[in-house]
Image (tube, grey):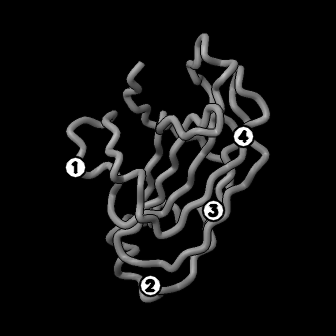
Amino acid sequence: AANAADVETLADLGEEVHLMFHPLRMEGMSIGSEAWTFTPVVDLRVVRGDPRRGRSAPHEIDHAAFEGPFVAQSTTGHPRSTTHDLTWEDTIQLTFMKARGLYVHVVLSDNRFGVGLGPLAELVLTLGEALDLIREPRVRRYTMQPFKVDQ
């Protein structure tokens, strides 16, 4: 498995990367009584540097990391169902130039009433990990790290 250091030593830095990401299903979401207004979206971002760096706790939201700038970014539409396990039909596609220190940042947010109400959970991969996924495309299961959401 490649890590971030492996990516930085590759001779093909500057090569164009085509990344396709399809969030098939999100299970175990606890949305409670707010289900009728829950409008989840998945945001796929490529960022310079680890977006978790500088947090005082793993579940803390660093708003600066969510405001960009991004190397590349795209967002899904709404899932088919918001009352049970979430499923999407959309595939997110990004194209960017391979560079040192890039991370893939997957963020689940609530876009209730068309207003971004903030991130709920995230998944962070190094570019090396994402490139490994491109080389061996298949369905994989990941656990997203939830954020502390003020009620």
Residue beneath disc 4: 78
Q: Earlier in the sequence, mark 3 or mark 2?
A: 2
- Name the image quarter holding the N terminus: bottom left
Mark toward the viewer: 3 or 2: 2
In primary-sequence order, the first of circles 2 and 1 is 2
How many angstroms separate mark 3 from mark 2 (CA)? 20 Å
Reading the image, the residue beneath label 1 is 54
Give neighbour class at mark 4: few <14, some 14-19, many 20+ (Cα, 10 Å): some
Which amino acid is tagged 3? Glu
Q: How many marks?
A: 4
**Image location (x, y in percent) of residue 137:** 67, 59
Task: From the image, state whether disc 4 or disc 3 is nearer to you.
Answer: 4
As shown in the figure, which amino acid type bears the numbered disc 1? Gly
Question: In screen coordinates, is 28 left or right of 9?
Answer: right
Q: Which of disc 2 and disc 4 is earlier in sequence?
A: 2
* Dot 3: element: loop
Q: Residues within 10 Å of mark 3 (few under 14, many from 20)?
A: few
Q: Which mark is residue 13?
A: 2
Mark 4 and mark 1 lie on one chain; the one further toward the N terminus is: 1
The reply to whether callout 4 and callout 1 are in contact (CB within 8 Å) is no
Q: Quadrant of the C terminus?
A: top left
Identify which residue is drawn at 40% across, 32% down: 147
User: Regarding mark 4 in the picture, which secondary structure is present there?
Assistant: loop
43 sits left or right of 60 in the view: right
Q: Picture coordinates of residue 75 (x, y %)? A: 63, 53
Disc 2 residue type (three-letter): Leu
Residue at image mark 3 = 136
Q: CA distance from mark 1 to mark 3?
A: 32 Å
Tell me the residue at 71%/20% (across/down).
83
Describe the element under mark 1 as helix, strand or loop. loop
Alpha-carbon distance for marks 4 and 2? Answer: 34 Å
Question: Quick one: label 1 or label 3, which is nearer the N terminus?
Answer: 1
